[in-house]
Image: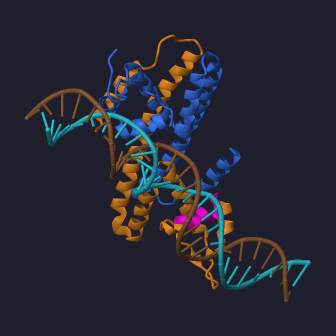
Chain colours: A orange, B blue, C cyan, D brown
Amino acid sequence: MKKYSIGEFANQVGLTTYTLRYYEKKHLIIPQRDANDRRYYTDDDIKWIGFLLHLKGTGMSMNEITEYVKLRAAGDSSIPKRKQLLKDVQARSLSQIEEMKVHLGVLSKKIDWYDGKLKHTISESFGDYLKRLRSKE
Amino acid sequence: MKKYSIGEFANQVGLTTYTLRYYEKKHLIIPQRDANDRRYYTDDDIKWIGFLLHLKGTGMSMNEITEYVKLRAAGDSSIPKRKQLLKDVQARSLSQIEEMKVHLGVLSKKIDWYDGKLKHTISESFGDYLKRLRSKE
DNA sequence: ATTTGACTTAGAGTGGACTCTAAGTGCTAA
DNA sequence: TTAGCACTTAGAGTCCACTCTAAGTCAAAT
């Protein structure tokens, strides 16, 4: 299996070597070492960093991903917990998208207003928005 | 028109007084002052902070909102620029949502895999994802 | 008259996610 | 053999968006 130096690996996955070392500090990805104590990464690491970036892209924090890594290291017995963690992330991510769409709706109205298609303000929806926020708590 | 102290206003809009003073430092909202030099906010400020939070919710940074405030202060001549700024934000926000959906798709597959519905890893899509990322630059 | 409580300021501290620097090691090519 | 280059480390610096502290002011209630 091919071995990648940190520089090659960084190029492959579109991160900097700084970031990879930072992720290592955070225990997100631990490469192996050669005889000279230099890091090398494998295709498995490419797969993992790929998934990691998808997780990050759903809004998971580094700490949450670290938590996932810990669970994974604990073996198959942690599968239910891992699954639940991902489901929570999924739910949060979906509601973030819905939230974003609400904000985008207001933004669109304002753009329309700038287009001269509307004369009044967008602010009357804000009261509803606050109520919605509070009802979530 | 009703006047709100910073504490009242903070309650109304769901922010802390700290945050309101911080926004003021950043020139995002400048309340008026009474005879004792205490801040007071009005219903117009409630409208503005409402819109500001919607802007923030679309992913605009504080600096971008400051930019918008500056344009607004420059008068009607800046309307085309303001409209363009909001359109750019809108486009970026929409593509962030699309991006998020891609990540969510991968997450869903992984959850299905944990559910025992799928047999292999999600990583084969990562190569495509990287290509897509690069083609955007 | 004093205490309470909400306000005022400048400036320090926090947490997240990087991003970089400095000093040093070790292979490779001229 | 020396110059260049990619690597190594610990730790410092950056940017963002808050969040809080300390010291002080002022009006109202006890």
Q: What residue sits 36% from the left and 24% below the top?
A: B34
Q: Main secondary structure of the magenta part?
A: helix
Quadrant (top left/top right/bottom left/bottom right) for the C terminus of chain A:
top left
Mark yes or no: residue B89 visible: yes
A65 displayed left or right of D15: left
Q: Position of residue D3 (x, y in %)?
A: 84, 77
Q: Nearer the viewer, residue B109 or A106?
A: A106
Q: Is residue A5 magenta?
A: no
Q: Is residue B54 above or below residue A33?
A: above
At x 47%, y 60%, the residue is: B119
B114 relative to A14 in the view: left or right: left
Residue drawn at (60%, 18%), measured in percent from left and top?
Answer: B75
Location of residue A112 (image quadrant): top right
Q: How far across and how far down the image is residue A60, in percent?
A: 45, 52
- Which of the 4 image quadrants contains residue C5? top left
User: Quarter holding the N terminus of chain A?
Assistant: bottom right
Q: Magenta span covers which residues? A: A13-23
Viewer-proximal residue among C14 and B110: C14
Q: Nearer the viewer, residue B116 or B44?
A: B44
Residue B100 at x, y percent in the picture: 52, 43
| Residue A3 seen in render | no
Q: Nearer the viewer, residue C9 or A121?
A: C9
Q: Is residue B105 above or below residue A106?
A: below
Residue B45 point in image, percent of width and height: 41, 23
Q: Is residue B45 above or below residue A54?
A: above
Identify the residue at image location x=32%, y=17%.
B2
